[in-house]
Image (cartoon, grey):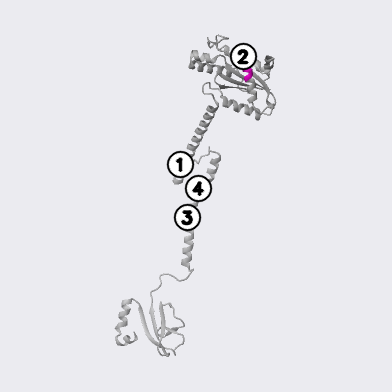
Amino acid sequence: MIFWRFVDPNLQRDLQKRSGIMFDIEIVENTLKKKSKKITLGSYISNSYRNKLGEIADYYPLVTEDSKILFYYTSPQRLFSTALLNSETFLKIIFFSICLLVFFIIIHKDITSPILDAQKLIHRIIKDKTIKFSTDRTDELGSLFNLIDRLLEDVHSKEQELQSHNIRLQKLSTTDGLTNIANRRSFDMYMNQLLISNSRSGDVSLLVCDVDYFKRFNDYYGHAAGDNTLKQIAQCLLHNLHSNTDFVARYGGEEFVIVLNDTSQHQGICVGNNLLKAIQNLNITHVLSDISDVVTISIGLHTFEKSAYTKYESLFNKADKALYAAKEQGRNQLITSSQLKDLST
């Protein structure tokens, strides 16, 4: 470059024009200033760097140590400041922080806070299903909350329907389908509960009833008439007992069982005799009966102290034996288990 500078001065101007950078080179003597680098003609600085005029300079040693080649050029001005925390950067940081804070407040108010409130409300709804969101919001969250309300209403309706089905199934499982009174399973549950969970003392009278000559009735009048007769007998027994303290169930076939709670043997005999008359007063014709021209029943009764037993099978057997004795003695009558000893003698 130095050579061509003297041979062809236009070369340097051509390179400046092509590169768009103003530069220059020259030879400086070390005698001027050691460890100095010339930046502009007639001026020196201690290190190479960009000065206020935008000039950058550096030098390279020649073969001899008496002089060096100085190369300097004027670079374009920076479009930004190199200071780390100047006023412009500081203002930008403050503006960005404020925008971020405002954005966070908006998000928290419109999204995060409603979701957290909804979470708390859902925990309350789990405990009390009558609580609703009932929101007035018209945005997406409002639509979501309304959908949740509808879902909860649907779930609540399904739960009520399921409970209703369970109650119906429970009733069906403990109700005789023909007579619409308690069935044998219900009788088992009732007796177990009476003897196990009830620690109070008191007499219980257990009555086992059987329709006299019912097979003959069925064969002569038909099964439809037989079923209708069993329905009438079941309702008659039910209506002639105290629903709060007494229990009646169809034990199987034409056999019924009655439990009179807190009832002595004498009281049980009175109730049993009333039932005999009530069934006879139904006046259901039975032409094949050997003892009457209407349908009648026989009853076996056993009275026991409920606090002395935890299982009822032996108690039922005693009442059933008394029923068998009543049928053997002519039917249409009541025999107690205490009379069996007298009959046996």
Number of the front mark, 2 or 3: 2
Query: How far is mark 3 from mark 4, CA to CA?
Result: 17 Å
Q: Amino acid at mark 2?
A: Glu
Q: Which residue is mark 2?
A: 328
First to last magenta residue range:
320-324
Q: How far apart are the two marked residues, 2 and 4, measured between alpha carbons? A: 80 Å
Circle 3 sits on which residue? Answer: 103
Q: Amino acid at mark 1?
A: Leu
Task: Report the front residue among 241 and 255.
Answer: 255
* Amino acid type at image mark 4: Ile
Q: Is residue 180 above or below residue 135?
A: above
Q: Residues within 10 Å of mark 1 (few under 14, many from 20)?
A: few
135 drawn magenta: no
Q: Which of the two labelled residues, at mark 2 and mark 4, occupies the earlier sequence position?
A: 4
| Distance CA(mark 3)–CA(mark 1) | 28 Å
Q: Position of residue 168 (x, y in %)?
A: 52, 29
Location of mark 4 (residue) = 115
Circle nearer the viewer, 3 or 1: 1
Q: Residue at x 33, y 76 (%)?
A: 19
| Quadrant in the rendering for residue 191 | top right
